[in-house]
Image: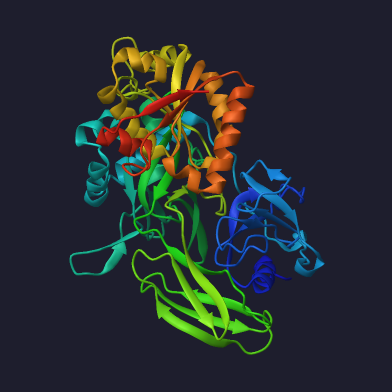
Amino acid sequence: MENIQSKYAELEAKLGGALRETDMIDTDYKDPKHPVYWLEFYGAHCPICGGSHWCMINVTGTKVVCQRQPNDHPFKATGGYMYYLGKNFKVSFDISRQKPLSTHPKAKPEVLDMFYRAVMLSYPLSDKHRENLHRRGLTDEIIKIRGERAFGTYYPTKKDKNGQIVDYFSQAKIEPSRNGGPVKIISLWNGMLDNLKQATGNPKFTHDYWFGVPGFYNVEYPYNGKTYKIPKFAPKVYGMLVPFYNEYNQIIGLQSRVDHVKESAEIINSHVLGGKLYVDFNDNTREYKVSMSNAVGKGKSVVIAKGKIAPGQDIVNLDYGHMKYAIKLQKGGKYFWVSSAKQKDGAKSGSPVSVVYNPEIAKLNPTKVDSETGNTTELDQIKDYAKKPKAIWLTEGGLKAIVASNYLPKRFNQQQLDVIGRDFLAVGGVSQYSHFLLMLKKLNVTSVTTAYDMDFQENQQVKDNYRKLLKMLKQYGYKIRLANWDLSEAKGIDDALVKGIEIDFREI
């Protein structure tokens, strides 16, 4: 039986580079037991714009969602544009040959919050990441405002005192049987659930209570001829854990902020005739090698250039005889959703909106119980605040919103905050602007202040999505206020507020 990966390889050969699965299901396939996912260009070149990142292709090679080249077919799911490819790109794909995955719908907010708080306690913020937050303007006092709902650091391994690589944190182990008794499985997460069941007497805390929490999945351990399932939290991308909150201060999603943003290279402005150019780029050494071949997978490729891209350099202009071309660096992603969509009993992250309240509301703990009454009084305060009519800020980036929300009361007085807003809503990416809408209604928002990065004029994709956001807000009758500042002094609203840069407001 042919493996699905061979189909990916066939498509990669046609496109001249690597692809990787996204979390977006290709709805051309209707069988929910065998979901098929769109593939992101991850070194392979988009046949529409030539880019090697961000654009996507379906597994049959019949459709491309291009993020750079606009047309009359906007694709609302990602903010890109749909293109239909000719028969030359088509790949024969048989869905029945794909191995189904056992995944679960996303868990309820209270379950997500409980496990993500446990993750933060198990993987506390590292010194390196704490220093990074300090540089961005967050003091330890500000970080403590959110308590165990603040930040964490996930690394799978570390060096011990002898310099050996070991697990950063042991989530589970198997103890051999004694005197013929059963094998004992010691699991951090199952142990936590057992303790909760014993302490509360509530039978709901079974060993599958974590089902639907993105980042968690079952790992199968073979031992003495048997296979044991043990839950594990293990994001594919590791780094600083950044929380996304709902309107009740509960953590309903996590992003990993990587320590090193990877770079790749692509060929642009190529005027080489009779062949195709490919570039291999080493992200660590910044060395490149350009090859030319007559056709993909056919003929012998010839190396026509080698070199090293200097720090701070984005484009290298080259020539081959009388023919000119260039190499352009592409930066990879900095933030990745914590997800386990491709793992056994895993779950998709989705793209939640983060509700980042001002410090006075952010410090309220929705799970704090009054010892005398047994009521969650702070949750009631949060709910009351959520219902009040309010102005709110909109931006892109969960961490950016956390930093900015703490500096609004330092830069504006209470009367000004009543007008421009004292809280933030943040999406994970500019193309997710439509996700704001439901939360605006939940929070009884009457007016919005938009605060996208000031370099949006230089980025066509960001500019297009910004325009769509404004159009959507107007359509639903929201008062709109644009926040602007000097790009030469700060790129994002967080930097502008931390540095005390003057911010201008324009109503539209």
> Does any portion of residue 508 appear in the rendered image?
yes
Q: Tell me residue 321's x, y (percent).
A: 55, 86
Q: Is residue 155 above or below residue 73?
A: below
Q: Tell me residue 236's x, y (percent).
A: 46, 56
Q: Is residue 291 shown left or right of residue 452? A: right
In this view, the residue in front, 269 or 249, is: 269
Q: Tell me residue 183's x, y (percent).
A: 42, 56
In this view, the residue in front, 156 or 307, is: 307
> Does any portion of residue 149 appear in the rendered image?
no
Q: Quadrant of the N terminus?
A: bottom right
In this view, the residue in front, 160 or 23, is: 23
Residue extending furthest toward the right: 87
At x 30% / y 20%, what residue is drawn?
360
At x 67% / y 79%, what residue is drawn?
296
Count every numbered label the image shows and give the total. 0
Q: Is residue 459 shown left or right of residue 158? A: right
Q: How is the image coloured?
A: rainbow
Q: Tell me residue 80's x, y (percent).
A: 63, 48
Residue extending furthest toward the left: 161
Q: Is residue 79 above or below residue 110?
A: below
Displayed quadrant of residue 104: top right
Displayed quadrant of residue 78: top right
